[in-house]
Image: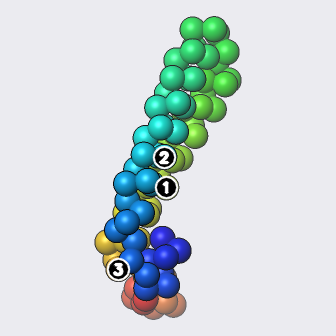
């Protein structure tokens, strides 16, 4: 998102970013299953929460990039302005 906001090409970052995201998300899933099996419910909840937050971050990045890398803010009248 930082590079897109500065007008740089971002397509070459897609594969490494996807790999890092998937590995991290899989590790969080695996750890939460292990924590549940061990009866460590707080750690399992925290691992799942981190996974959900990672998915929210990906959704926000997708929306940001679909808008062309511009932050949309709301003006006083409620009209979105770039």
Q: Earlier in the sequence, mark 3 or mark 2?
A: 2
- What residue is disc 1 on? 57
The numbered dot on residue 79 is: none
Q: Is residue 47 left or right of residue 77?
A: right
Judging depth in this view, the residue of 32 and 2 nearest the camera is 2
Mark pair 1, 3: CA separation: 17 Å
**Residue at left 43%, top 85%?**
7
| Cα–Cα span, label 2 and label 1 | 14 Å
| Residues at discs 2 and 1 in contact (Cβ within 8 Å) | no
Residue ID for mark 2: 20
Q: CB of mark 1 within 8 Å of CB of mark 3?
A: no
- Seen from the viewer's position, the closer of residues 73 and 21 is 21
Where is 62 relative to 75, above or below? Answer: above
Q: Is residue 49 above or below residue 18?
A: above
For label 3, the residue is: 68
Question: Is the Cβ of the residue at disc 3 closer than 8 Å to that at disc 2?
Answer: no
User: Residue lying furthest top in this view?
Assistant: 38
Q: Split into 4 quadrants, where in the image is the C terminus?
A: bottom left
């Amino acid at each position: 998102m930082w590079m897109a906001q500065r007008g740089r090409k971002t397509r070459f970052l897609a594969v490494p970013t996807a790999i890092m995201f998937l590995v991290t998300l899989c590790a969080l899933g695996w750890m939460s299953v292990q924590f549940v099996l061990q009866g460590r419910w707080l750690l399992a909840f925290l691992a799942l929460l981190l996974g959900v937050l990672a998915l929210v971050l990906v959704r926000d990045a997708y929306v940001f990039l679909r808008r062309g890398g511009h932050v949309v803010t709301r003006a006083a009248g409620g009209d979105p302005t770039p």
